[in-house]
Image (cartoon, rainbow, N blue to C red):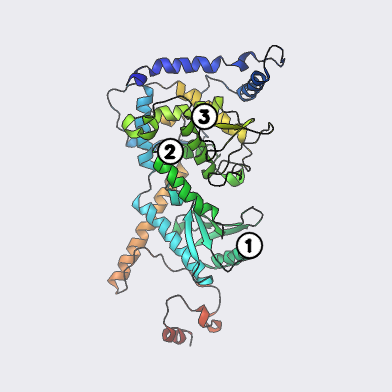
């Protein structure tokens, strides 16, 4: 492809342009310049103070592993660094796919959650939302759960979450439970025990925004085939820098998806449309990753602009006043800000700049290209092993039950305890789910 064959010259031009921007000779004087030029120089100066275009990107010390390189098949020839980077990205995406065992382990957690919730609220509607529902989750990502309880009013949501937290503490599913009742949308946060894969689960009640967002995001995923691989790449990238945890001021999954959607709509480097519509056929993922880092690392002015992909696809809209807040509008409710909690804005753009600087220096002789900006820690790898063991352990338990005449059901984990009540004080409503009335009375007699 013509563009790919000239990739080296393009990268050299990009390097020259990035090191010769207005901020290199910035002056505080506004004389002889328009207000727009002055504002652009202010933005460039702010964001370039800490940029060193020759410094390598350094992940946190514990992030050293590149296990996808074990399945990467290096070809004899590549049409430039971006071409090889594309193939490394494919190996990364293959490695990061959930295995059948990992999916089963997450299903076991959901089965345990349903048992606890239905034991307290019979007929409650339980749904997944977020990345677990859109398929944009990593193997160890949190599980987002929405519970619909029509009879629970908004005023009773917090009290109900505390009631559920008590139920979960009595069950064998969780190791810790916490209710964040100060959040705009109150949420119950629990961590599962090692027997269930040590996963984190976020639960809300009667909040339909998450499930509605699933439909909208799935629509964008269908329209933009490049969106899914780009999001999964950037999730791993932000994870290693501890910048992906929204409650701690990081960038949440939904906000990251919106950044990627805007980037693909804007196509700031004017790539052929097939790069976005057919990324596998055009082998364009390397180009798109580099372009993303360039756009958000050096050209996007978060201080004066905001993103609203629903109302202005591919365009930046001006803020009413300049500030240091990242502003991203909701895809289905443009009045809502979804990045207000992000308090590490400068850190985001700094790591994008640093990553872009490193990507500019890629060489076909490098042992790994993607591994220079994305690496995994041993904890992530160990948790994936744990999830597989959870599923295998359940399979062995199910096989044992079949051999002893029990009904086979490979999707059910061991039943959590029904509570701390003594056997003598239990009533009919406290009976184990599915128990026979006669058998229950005999068991407590």
Measuring 42% from the left and 67% from the top, which residue is drawn there? 414
Residue that numbered label 3 is attached to: 58
- Residue neighbourhood size for the residue with mark 3, other residues' Cα within 10 Å, grouped as few (<14), some (14–19), many (≥20): some
- The mark closer to the camera, 2 or 3, is 2
Q: Earlier in the sequence, mark 1 or mark 2?
A: 1
**Disc number for residue 227:** 2
CB atoms of marks 1 and 2 within 8 Å: no
Q: Is residue 198 above or below residue 75?
A: below
Q: Is residue 384 left or right of residue 40?
A: left
Disc 1 is placed on an element classified as helix
Measuring 41% from the left and 38% from the top, which residue is drawn there? 224
- Residue neighbourhood size for the residue with mark 1, other residues' Cα within 10 Å, grouped as few (<14), some (14–19), many (≥20): few
Q: Residue furthest front?
A: 311
Residue that numbered label 1 is attached to: 154
Quadrant of residue 421 within the rendered picture: bottom right
Which x, y percent locates residue 282? 33, 29
Measuring 66% from the left and 33% from the top, which residue is drawn there? 324
Q: Earlier in the sequence, mark 1 or mark 3?
A: 3
Measuring 62% from the left and 17% from the top, which residue is drawn there? 23
Which x, y percent locates residue 70? 33, 36
Quadrant of residue 279 within the rendered picture: top left
> How many numbered marks, from 0 up?
3
Q: CA distance from mark 2 to mark 3?
A: 26 Å
């Amino acid at each position: 492809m013509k563009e790919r064959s000239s990739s080296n010259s393009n990268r050299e031009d990009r390097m020259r342009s990035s090191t010769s921007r207005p901020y290199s000779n910035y002056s505080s004087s506004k004389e002889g310049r328009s207000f727009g030029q002055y504002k652009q120089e202010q933005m460039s100066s702010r964001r370039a103070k800490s940029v060193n275009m020759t410094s390598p990107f350094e992940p946190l010390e514990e992030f050293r592993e590149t296990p996808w390189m074990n399945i990467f098949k290096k070809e004899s020839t590549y049409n430039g660094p971006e071409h090889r980077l594309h193939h490394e990205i494919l190996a990364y995406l293959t490695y990061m796919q959930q295995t059948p065992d990992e999916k089963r382990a997450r299903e076991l957690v959901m089965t345990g959650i349903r048992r606890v919730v239905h034991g307290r609220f019979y007929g409650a509607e339980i749904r997944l939302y977020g990345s677990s529902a859109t398929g944009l989750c990593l193997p160890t990502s949190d599980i987002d759960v929405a519970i619909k309880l029509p009879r629970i009013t908004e005023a009773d949501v917090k009290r109900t979450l505390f009631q559920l937290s008590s139920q979960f503490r009595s069950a064998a599913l969780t190791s810790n439970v916490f209710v964040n009742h100060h959040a705009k949308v109150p949420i119950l946060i629990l961590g599962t025990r090692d027997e269930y894969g040590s996963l984190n689960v976020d639960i809300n009640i009667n909040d339909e925004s998450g499930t509605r967002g699933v439909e909208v995001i799935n629509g964008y995923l269908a329209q933009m085939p490049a969106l899914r691989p780009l999001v999964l790449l950037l999730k791993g990238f932000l994870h290693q820098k501890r910048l992906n945890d929204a409650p701690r001021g990081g960038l949440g999954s939904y906000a990251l998806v919106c950044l990627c959607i805007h980037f693909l709509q804007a196509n700031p480097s004017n790539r052929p449309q097939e790069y976005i519509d057919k990324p596998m056929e055009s082998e364009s993922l390397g180009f798109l990753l580099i372009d993303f880092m360039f756009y958000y690392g050096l050209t996007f002015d978060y201080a004066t602009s905001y993103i609203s992909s629903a109302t202005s696809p591919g365009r930046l809209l001006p803020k009413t006043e300049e500030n240091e807040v990242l502003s991203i509008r909701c895809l289905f409710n443009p009045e809502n800000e979804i990045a207000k909690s992000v308090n590490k804005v400068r850190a985001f753009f700094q790591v994008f700049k640093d990553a872009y600087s490193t990507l500019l220096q890629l060489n076909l002789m490098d042992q790994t290209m993607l591994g220079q900006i994305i690496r995994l820690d041993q904890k992530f790898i160990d948790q994936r092993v744990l999830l597989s063991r959870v599923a295998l352990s359940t399979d062995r338990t199910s096989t044992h039950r079949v051999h002893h005449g029990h009904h086979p059901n490979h999707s059910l984990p061991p039943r959590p305890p029904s509570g701390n009540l003594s056997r003598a004080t239990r009533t009919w409503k406290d009976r184990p789910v599915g128990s026979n009335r006669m058998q229950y009375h005999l068991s407590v007699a």
